[in-house]
Amino acid sequence: MKLAVESHGNGEPLVLIHGLGSAATAWKPLTKLLVNDFQVITVDLPGHGNSPFSLNQPMDPTSLAKLVVKNVKGLGIEKFNLIGNSLGGWIALEMAANHEENIKSVVALAPAGLWLTPFTSRYPGEVALRVIAGGANKLAPSVLNYSWAKKIGFETVSPKWRDLDYEVCLDATNAMAKSLGYFPTWDALLGKRFDKKINKDIPITIIFGDTDHTLPEKTCQERSLAPDHAKWLILSNTGHAPMWDSTDQVYAEVMSTVGSIL
């Protein structure tokens, strides 16, 4: 499958992978900084953003990792750095584990898959969340100007929801509404977790926020499943999207992680 891929800037190739129900647009706050130092490559996963959905495409993290590698190599890029958020963080770890010859470094922001007991069913409320987003996207351009609307949509995602940029909120609402791959991807990760080894020559930085309600510390941040050599950070006053809440700190960690191999 050919994914929607965009490339901006020059320098070391850096691939950004979004989370479930999201899209490449989620990276805008961070991309504004990264393009000064890297060739920033964003991808939309199948059935997300501008990428089509196909029933023939396996949607589990291992298969999606293989697909992203294939699409990046299709640009003529053989070795590259990675940033992933949530499901995208899990996919990035899978890429480093299964395609180490292509991966130079990984920064995983609130990566999914680090749970001792895999999920056997979807989160309660997931159907409602998807339905609400599907109906709200037509109203979003106007109602997101109001604090109450931002609170409903983003209070559980970000402790800084009041300060989130209007464009970030609008992009996120539209991405969820369009994500035909949302439920197929959810179902494909049930019963699974990340528990593979990664070559110690690949620098890994894992970043969680201290107020991540989507993947909470007690159940979804198991350090024993992370690579032994991974740097593990907890950012204060930060939720499930560190690239929104702590953009400058994430940028600094990306520069440090990539810089360690240059």
Image (cartoon, rainbow, N blue to C red):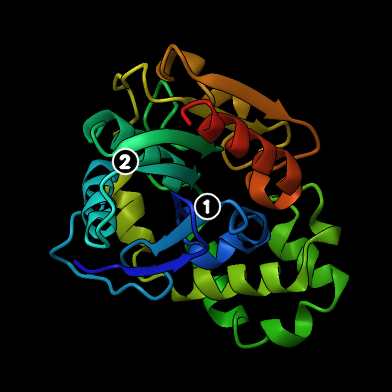
Residue at 38% x, 34% y is 104
Sooner in the amino-acid sequence: mark 2 or mark 1: 1
**Residue 209, horizontal then vertical, whole percent:** 68, 35
Residue placed at 38% from the left, 40% from the top? 92
* Residue at 79 percent of width and 57 percent of height: 161
- Residue in the image at 68% along x and 26% along y: 234
- Is residue 236 shown above or below 72? above
In this view of the protein, which residue sits in the foreground, 45 or 37?
A: 37
Amino acid marked by disc 1: Phe
Residue 119 appears anywhere in the view: no
Q: Is disc 1 placed on a helix, strand or loop?
A: strand
Which mark, by number, is residue 38? Answer: 1
Q: Quadrant of the N terminus?
A: bottom left
* Residue 155 visible (yes or no): yes
Residue 55 position in % (x across, y down): 17, 67
Q: Position of residue 210 (x, y in %)?
A: 72, 31
Q: Which mark is residue 190?
A: 2
